[in-house]
C-alpha cells in the first residue's frame, strides 16, 4: 500500500541511477517529475525506462497495463522550479561531485515547499555537508539506491548529523513501500556499503597492477572461491571506473588513511576514458555487447 504521506516525487538527474529511481517510484504508484538540464538526456532516460519495463513484461513480472500506468506517472522537466514546486520528496541523483551537489541543494532549499524532504543518492559524499548548504538540515538525508535500481533490494539510508528521527522514519517507510530493504547507517566517508566495497575493489586493482594475477584470474578467484556473483573487476566496470575513483578520493580525503588512496592503474584508466560498460571498455572490452578480457600487458606497471 502506498505511503500516504508522500505521493509527489521529484528526481534530479536522468542518468543510470536517476532513471532507475524514477522507474521504481512510478511503478509503485508515485507521481514522478524527472528533471534534467538536457532534453536529450530526458529522452534517452524515457527510452531506457520503457526498455526496462518491456523486459519486465516479457518476464511476466508486470503486465502491459502496468507498463502503461508506470509511464503515465512520469513527467519530464528541464526547469527546476517547475519540477519541484509541489514535491513532497526530492531525490537528487546528479554527478558525484561536491560543488555540483551543494549548488543543487542550495537551489532545492529555496524552491521546494517547506515540508519537502531532500534526499541524495550519493554513494560517498557527506550528508552533513550537503545538509549544511540548506536551511532545513533536519529534512536532509541520504537515500542510496543500488544499480540496477528496480532489481537491487537494498536502500542505504544515511543520517546526517542533523537529520531528524521523523525524516528517517518517513524515508524508511518510503523505501519499504518501494519493496526495498532499508538499512540505516551514519554519515562517515563511504557510509557502510562503499566503506567495505571500495577498498576491496582498490585491492583488486592493485593485484592486477602489481602483476599478481590477470583480469579473469582475479575475478574467477572471487567468484568461485568467495562466492561473489560478480568478480571485483567486472563489478568495477559495471559501477563505472570514474565513480570508483570519485568515491575513493572522497574516502581518502575524508578518512586520511593511505589505504584508501586510488590505485595508479585506476587513475590512468579513467584519464584514458576507459570507464567500463558506459564507455565500452574498462577491464573488459564490451564491443558489440560481448565481454572479453583486455590484453593483460595493458595493465602492467
Image (cartoon, rainbow, N blue to C red):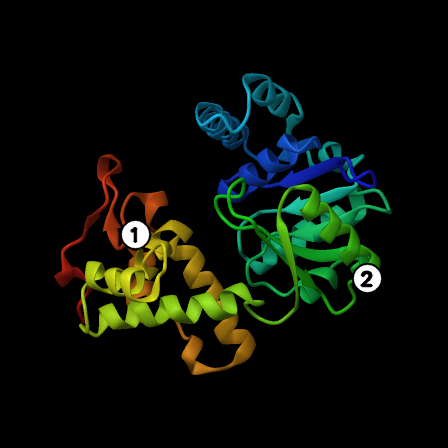
The quadrant of the picture occupied by the N terminus is top right
Which residue carries the number 2 mark? 165
Closer to the N terminus: mark 1 or mark 2? 2
**Front position in the image: 109 or 243:** 243
Q: 30 above or below 125?
A: above
> Is 44 placed left or right of 200 in the picture?
right
The alpha-carbon separation of the residues under discs 1 and 2 comes to 42 Å
The quadrant of the picture occupied by the C terminus is bottom left
Of helix, strand and loop, which one carries label 2? helix
Q: Mark number for residue 245?
A: none
> Is 109 placed left or right of 194 in the picture?
right
- Residue 195 seen: yes
Q: How many marks?
A: 2
Of helix, strand and loop, which one carries label 1? loop
Where residue 196 appears, as percent x and y from the top left, is 48, 70
Where residue 197 appears, as percent x and y from the top left, is 45, 66
Which residue carries the number 1 mark? 274
**Front position in the image: 185 or 13:** 185
Q: 193 above or below 207?
A: above
Where residue 199 appears, as percent x and y from the top left, is 42, 71
Q: In which quarter of the image is residue 213?
A: bottom left
In this rendering, which labeled residue sits more in front, label 1 or label 2? 2
Q: Are the residues at dot 1 and dot 2 in contact (C-beta closer than 8 Å)?
A: no
Residue that sits furthest to the bottom in the current view:
257
| Residue visible at 67% across and 49% down in the picture | 104
Q: In which quarter of the image is residue 88?
A: top right
- Residue 36 seen: no
Q: 278 above or below 38?
A: below
| Residue visible at 48% across and 63% down in the picture | 247
Amino acid at each position: 500500500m502506498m505511503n500516504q504521506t508522500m505521493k509527489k516525487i521529484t528526481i534530479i538527474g536522468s542518468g543510470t541511477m536517476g532513471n532507475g529511481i524514477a522507474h521504481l517510484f512510478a511503478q509503485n504508484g508515485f507521481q514522478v517529475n524527472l528533471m534534467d538540464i538536457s532534453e536529450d538526456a530526458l529522452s534517452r532516460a524515457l527510452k531506457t525506462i520503457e526498455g526496462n519495463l518491456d523486459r519486465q513484461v516479457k518476464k511476466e513480472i508486470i503486465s502491459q497495463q502496468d507498463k502503461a500506468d508506470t509511464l503515465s506517472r512520469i513527467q519530464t522537466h528541464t526547469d527546476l522550479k517547475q519540477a519541484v514546486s509541489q514535491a513532497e520528496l526530492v531525490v537528487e541523483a546528479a554527478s558525484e561531485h561536491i560543488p555540483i551537489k551543494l549548488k543543487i541543494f542550495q537551489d532545492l532549499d529555496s524552491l521546494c515547499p517547506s515540508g519537502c524532504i531532500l534526499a541524495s543518492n550519493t554513494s560517498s559524499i557527506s550528508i552533513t555537508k550537503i545538509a549544511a548548504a540548506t536551511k532545513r538540515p533536519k529534512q536532509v538525508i541520504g537515500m542510496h539506491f543500488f544499480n540496477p535500481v528496480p532489481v537491487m533490494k537494498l536502500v542505504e539510508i544515511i543520517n546526517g548529523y542533523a537529520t531528524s528521527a521523523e525524516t528517517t522514519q518517513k524515508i524508511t517507510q518510503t523505501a519499504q513501500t518501494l519493496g526495498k530493504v532499508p538499512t540505516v547507517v551514519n554519515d562517515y566517508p563511504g557510509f557502510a556499503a562503499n566503506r567495505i566495497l571500495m577498498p576491496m575493489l582498490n585491492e583488486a586493482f592493485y593485484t592486477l597492477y602489481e602483476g599478481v594475477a590477470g583480469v579473469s584470474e582475479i575475478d574467477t578467484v572471487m567468484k568461485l572461491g568467495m562466492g561473489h556473483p560478480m568478480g571485483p573487476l567486472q563489478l568495477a566496470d559495471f559501477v563505472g571506473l570514474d565513480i570508483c575513483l570519485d568515491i575513493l578520493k572522497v574516502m581518502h580525503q575524508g578518512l586520511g588513511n593511505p589505504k584508501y588512496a586510488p590505485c595508479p592503474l585506476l587513475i590512468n584508466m579513467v584519464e584514458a576514458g576507459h570507464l567500463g560498460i558506459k564507455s565500452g571498455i574498462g577491464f573488459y572490452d564490451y564491443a558489440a555487447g560481448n565481454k572479453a578480457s583486455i590484453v593483460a600487458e595493458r595493465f602492467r606497471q
